[in-house]
Image (tube, rainbow, N blue to C red):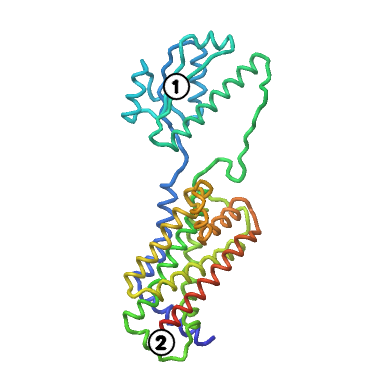
Amino acid sequence: MNRILAVAGKEFLHILRDRRSLAVALLMPLTMVLLYGAVIDMELRDLRVGVLDLDGGDRSRELLRAMTSSGFIIEAERLDGRDAIEAGFRQGRLQAALVVPRGYGEDLARGGARVQILVDGADASTAATVANYLQAVVALVNRDLLRDAGLAAPFDARTRVWFNPELVSARFVVPGLVALVLMMICALLTSIAITREKEAGTLEQILTTPVTPAQVIVGKVLPYVALGALDCAMVLLAGKWVFGVPMAGSWWLLAAYCLLFIVIALSLGLLISARSPSLRVAMMAALMVTMLPTMILSGFVFPIASMPGPLQVVCRLLPATHFLVVLRGIMLKGQAWFPLQTAALVVMAAVLLTLAIRSFRLRLE
């Protein structure tokens, strides 16, 4: 134990003396969560819709008022013909167009009115949102008309959103940022731990001492665990105070899972460090192995269920995938037990730490 503490003390002093690396380790997570939390906004507002009202009656005006009453959709332009729709799409002035045909009011009185919705599909995700919203507006108008006529709709679906009723993007994004920041910073910091010793020539001094590979690895991990825990606390507090992310579960349980994830990230960084020939290679490998997979394949931005089957298998092999389920479950849903994710994270931590120790032992041999 004394040998582990001696290695940890040496690494801790080295971290304190390297002011630039320490500043990066402390400021980068805070900067990332503030920047990404403010920029990544999945809520769509002020969707620009052109209106071609060929009817011009009271009924058509009621439909347009219903469309623009919520503020998500604005009537960007009153069109004078169908040719103006394509021109609006091509010039980016419109995202959709609503066409109200002549005789809409009379057809509505007879129960057979139709309107046309045209959507610019160049941005598929926005197009789907606009189309769904306009169809929802038409459905609401239909329901109101049936109610005014004293008729009941065949069925009435009432939607109620749980855990994030206002559909605030930050509550979905910030937990993902916790996983991204911890994985990237912790792996990057430790990826240079051994290669820096090799390039500075101090690794030979360590090899002359009676410490074992396991003691060296554990001793090097300990200071970075404390640093990673500090980063994690800053990111979570920034998410709560700046972006209003709620905490429905236990802070202690969240801290335990964060600690487990930090150990995984640090072990991955040490494994990269032990296998890399130089400091530059270690840093590049750490960024490539951690940043891109965590952003793209962990479910942080893109849903895993929509990915191809073989890619979903790869996603399940990433620690961030399971950690994200735990984070969102604790923070948003107040869950307390994640047997599958816990088992996966424990196994990954054990495997990566063992591989890091074995790789360092091979280097010693």
Q: Residue at x 65, y 18 (%)?
A: 147
Give the residue type that dot 1 points to.
Leu
Q: Measured from the top left, where is residue 135 in percent x and y?
A: 52, 26
Horizontal side of 365 relative to 20 (left or right) equals right
Q: Measured from the top left, where is residue 38 in percent x and y?
A: 43, 48
The residue under label 2 is 206
Question: Could you say whether the residue bearing mark 2 is in a helix, strand or loop?
Answer: helix
Which corner quadrant holds the C terminus?
Answer: bottom left
Q: From what the image shows, is residue 19 above or below residue 140?
A: below
Give the residue type that dot 2 points to.
Ile
Q: Residue furthest front?
A: 310
Which corner quadrant holds the N terminus?
Answer: bottom right
Q: From what the image shows, is residue 254 above or below residue 79?
A: below
The residue under label 1 is 98
User: In this rendering, does residue 241 appear at all?
Assistant: no
Q: Measured from the top left, where is residue 261 in percent x and y?
A: 53, 65
Q: From what the image shows, is residue 217 above or below residue 306?
A: below
Q: Residue at x 40, y 91 (%)?
A: 208
Circle 1 crowding by C-alpha within 10 Å: few under 14, some 14–19, many from 20: many
Question: Could you say whether the residue bearing mark 1 is in a helix, strand or loop?
Answer: strand
User: In this rendering, does residue 156 appear at all?
Assistant: yes
Image quarter of residue 338: bottom right
User: Which dot marks residue 178?
Assistant: none
Horizontal side of 159 relative to 296 (left or right) equals right
Q: Earlier in the sequence, mark 1 or mark 2?
A: 1
Q: From what the image shows, is residue 329 above or below residue 86?
A: below
Q: Measured from the top left, where is residue 290 in percent x and y?
A: 43, 62
Image quarter of residue 260: bottom right
